[in-house]
Image: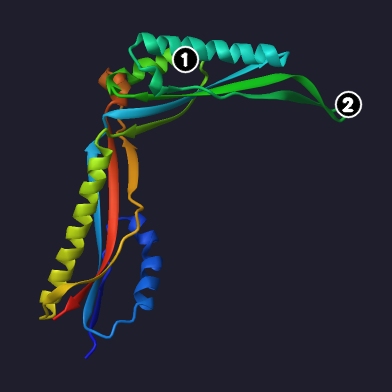
Amino acid sequence: MKKTILAALLASSFFATTLPFASQNVQATELSFAHIETIGTSQVVISADMAELIVEVNTQADTPANAKSASDQAVAGFIARLKQAGINRDNIQSANLSLHPRHQYDPETRTNNEVGYNASRKVVVTLDDLNILNEVLDTALEQGINRIIDISYKSSKEAELIEQARALAIKDAQQKAKSLAKGFGEKIDGVWEIRYFDQHNVQPVMYKRNAAAQGDVGESYQQAQTTISDRVEVVFRLK
């Protein structure tokens, strides 16, 4: 008798969103022998030790040259301070410029009149030391940077953690198959098919706390975690 057991135990909303796709694969696979199909999942959480900071300066002036000059000065001053703080120039990206006219609507003439120019530049900084993150943010504001776009926390061991998450997902699939087979009085007879999509999910999660109450603003930017998830679908033959 053909026996098919499907185990789809999903550990997070990320896995839940991929369930319809997995179900389509299961339905499309018509095997004539007894088998078990499982989905192995994993999640590895580690404290971050790196950060990527994206900031931007927006300036306004009467001429495009003056607008560009103002933004260039802010970026140059920021980079100089970063280098003084010991940050390698290779960890600083700033080769970009956006420049466009600024208009103002005149209700009397019902026209948009050019009243100046806007210039903006982004700076991306990779920090290997979270202890100086708050200092870098303050420095950016002091040099005229007027927008903080994003702070992404990372781990220097990301490649190693991805491998670890994959190994845990494989182990999870194996354990589920053995447990299900045992529960139905069956035994595993090896792997028939492995379906793996290289889509490991890396999620930086910032630890939130009341920095003012604790009296240590700098530390409030250091407590962050990185979560790496993975999954694998496996078809096991039954004896």
Q: Are marks 1 and 2 in contact (CB under 8 Å)?
A: no
Residue 217 image position (x, y, % from top left): 31, 19
Instruction: Looking at the picture, tell me which residue is in the foreground, 97 or 42.
Output: 97
Disc 1/disc 2 C-alpha distance (Å) = 39 Å
Give the foreground label among 1 and 2: 1
Residue most extreme to the bottom: 1
Looking at the rendered image, the quarter that the N terminus falls into is: bottom left
Q: With respect to residue 198, does 194 lie above or below? A: below
Q: Quadrant of residue 15?
A: bottom left
Q: Residue at x 88, y 26 (%)?
A: 108
Q: Is residue 180 shown above or below 107?
A: below
Q: Say if residue 99 shows up in the picture.
A: yes
Please state which amino acid type lies under the numbered disc 1.
Answer: Leu
Q: On residue 141, which mark appears?
A: 1
**What is the number of callouts on the image?**
2
Q: Is residue 218 above or below residue 52?
A: above
Q: Nearer the viewer, residue 53 or 220?
A: 53
Q: Find residue 140 and report its horizontal and vertical position in percent.
A: 45, 15
- Disc 1 residue crowd, few under 14, some 14–19, many 20+, Cα 10 Å: some
Residue that appears at 67% across and 11% down: 66
User: Tag 2, which secondary structure?
Assistant: loop
In which quadrant of the rendered image does the C terminus lie? Answer: bottom left
The mark that comes first in sequence, 1 or 2, is 2
Which residue is under mark 2? Answer: 108
Q: Nearer the viewer, residue 236 or 136?
A: 236
